[in-house]
Image (tube, rainbow, N blue to C red):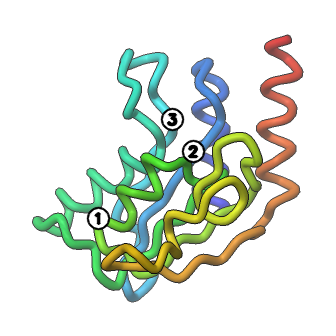
Amino acid sequence: MRLALERARTAAEAGEVPVGAVVLDAGGAVLAAAANARESTADPTAHAEILALRQAARERGEWRLSGCTLVVTLEPCTMCAGAAVQARVERVVYGAVDEKAGAAGSLWDVLRDRRLNHRPEVLMGVLADDCAALLGDFFTRRR
């Protein structure tokens, strides 16, 4: 999560919403790390999670990220939760809860929806205060 927080800080410095994501392989090695890049790329799908999942898939040479863990500073939205399911990640770990758009237990629970063919393990609240503070500070400065 600390690497994801570093990426989130980098995003904030670039004027992006400070969200960072990391994909770890089954042994805990970093496959990919990314930060939000929607503003700089004018791409609505350039969420940190999507970028990290894409990088990890390229690194592995396949779209299935079985055995991998997605670590993200903010609870994934529906798009990112869906991508994690589609990528077959084993586990999703996140810090701050997103009560407005979260899809890992707060507003929706895409990751644990029994109707889907894959349900990653979900661990929430890892360094949640640090993750939430970074987001809070960013939005306070923008207002």
Identity of the residue furthest to the left in this view: 61
How packed is label 1: few (under 14 Cα within 10 Å), some, or many (20 or more)?
some
How far is the residue under mark 3 from the one under mark 2?
A: 8 Å
Query: In the figure, residue 89 lies in which quadrant?
Result: bottom left
Q: Residue at x 40, y 26 (%)?
A: 44
Q: Residue at x 66, y 28 (%)?
A: 12
Q: Residue at x 58, y 31 (%)?
A: 11
How packed is label 2: few (under 14 Cα within 10 Å), some, or many (20 or more)?
many
Location of mark 2 (residue): 7
| Residue type beneath disc 3 | Asn
| Residue type beneath disc 2 | Arg
Q: Nearer the viewer, mark 3 or mark 2?
A: 3
How packed is label 3: few (under 14 Cα within 10 Å), some, or many (20 or more)?
many
Query: In the figure, residue 32 lies in which quadrant?
Result: bottom left
| Residue 104 position within the rendered picture, expressed as x and y whole percent measured from the top left | 61, 63
| Residue 19 position within the rendered picture, expressed as x and y whole percent measured from the top left | 61, 42
| Residue 85 position within the rendered picture, expressed as x and y whole percent measured from the top left | 37, 67
Answer above or below: position of 140 versus 132: above
- In terms of secondary structure, where does tag 2 sit? helix
Q: Quadrant of the N terminus?
A: bottom right
Location of mark 1 (residue): 86
* Residue 37 or residue 100, whichever sits in front: 100
| Residue type beneath disc 1 | Gln
Answer above or below: position of 51 versus 91: above
Location of mark 3 (residue): 36
- Residue 125 visible: yes
Residue 134 in the figure: left or right of residue 3: right
Dot label at residue 47: none
